[in-house]
Image: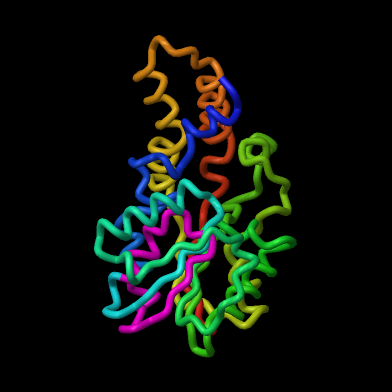
Amino acid sequence: MSAEEVRAIVSAAGNDRLTWNTPLSEEHADRLIAACAPAPGARIVDLGSGWGELLMRLVDAAPGATGDGVETDPDAVARGRKLAGQRGLGDRVRFHEVPAAEWTEDGYDLAVSIGSSHAWPGTTREALTALAATVRPGGRVLFGEGIWLKEPTPAALEGVGAGPGDFGSLLELIRLAESVGLRALQVTVADEREWDLFESEGPIGRGQRWALEHPDHPHAEVTAEIDARRTGYYGGYRSYLTLAYLVLST
């Protein structure tokens, strides 16, 4: 089995058990949407939107609001367009297969980027600067980024595939946002239950389910990928790394 086939099996875009490609509960998502408070007719952009589940919920929360989902993964874009059509949002949510860093429209009321700061070359500061420039004065930004909860161990670093300086603390992230003119309105982090469910329903769980459903198919590569991810999470970055969600104002 090729590496491409293994990636397709464990991919997020094709995993219908994942509501969104991030550790996030329904209750937590509702709180984020409430804090973003999209007004009727709001223009919203999600840079690195995946299949746009959060974008669609934000648009649906505000009568007449419209949204642009900017995403390079064609499978995620196809899933997003299908979901938008099924929910009657096809004329209000549009998906664009464009790199986030190349999106040039601005004047939005709300800009969203969850776990996608790598789309901008350089640093998290660069991503925050770009998001601040994307919204109108008085607009809001919803930014999701990894943070260390405590000093990472070598196993935690190896599990994430990161260096000690790739992520900072929660306070460092808040201060970084402030340095580019964004003030925190609400700060929350994914808890362990959200992470556990995300990992169980995500690549680890999907790969395991696929192997059980295809007992006669050679799947040593899939099993190896599952084992590596399981070791990296449970034996590595669990309780060390989490995702912070910052609702910010300009």
Q: Which residue lies furthest to the bottom in this view?
A: 137
Closer to us: 199 or 207: 207
Q: Which residue sits at x=65%, y=45%?
A: 152
Q: Position of residue 74 (x, y in %)?
A: 50, 49
How many marks are shown on the rendered structure? 0
- The vertical placement of 63 against 85, above or below, is below
Q: Nearer the viewer, residue 150 or 176?
A: 176
Whether residue 227 sits left or right of residue 21 in the image: it is right
In front: 234, or 131?
Answer: 131
Is residue 190 among what the camera can see? yes
Image-based side of 121 in relation to 250, left or right:
right
Q: What stretch is highlighted in magenta?
A: 33-59
Q: Quadrant of the N terminus?
A: top right
Query: Which residue: 42% across, 66% down?
Result: 94
Q: Where is residue 78 in the image (x, y as percent from the top left)?
A: 42, 51
Which x, y percent locates residue 3? 60, 27
Instruction: Inspect the magenta stretch and tell me whether residue 221 lies in it.
Output: no
Q: Based on the displayed image, in which of its 4 quarters is residue 201 positioned?
A: top left
The image shows residue 65, relative to residue 87, as above or below, that is below
- The colour mode here is rainbow
Q: In this view, does 136 lie above or below 25?
A: below
Which image quadrant is residue 89 in?
A: bottom left
For residue 72, what is the image quadrant?
bottom right
Q: In this view, does 119 lie to the left or right of 37?
A: right
> Is any atom of residue 172 visible in this view?
no
The reply to whether the magenta stretch includes residue 46 is yes
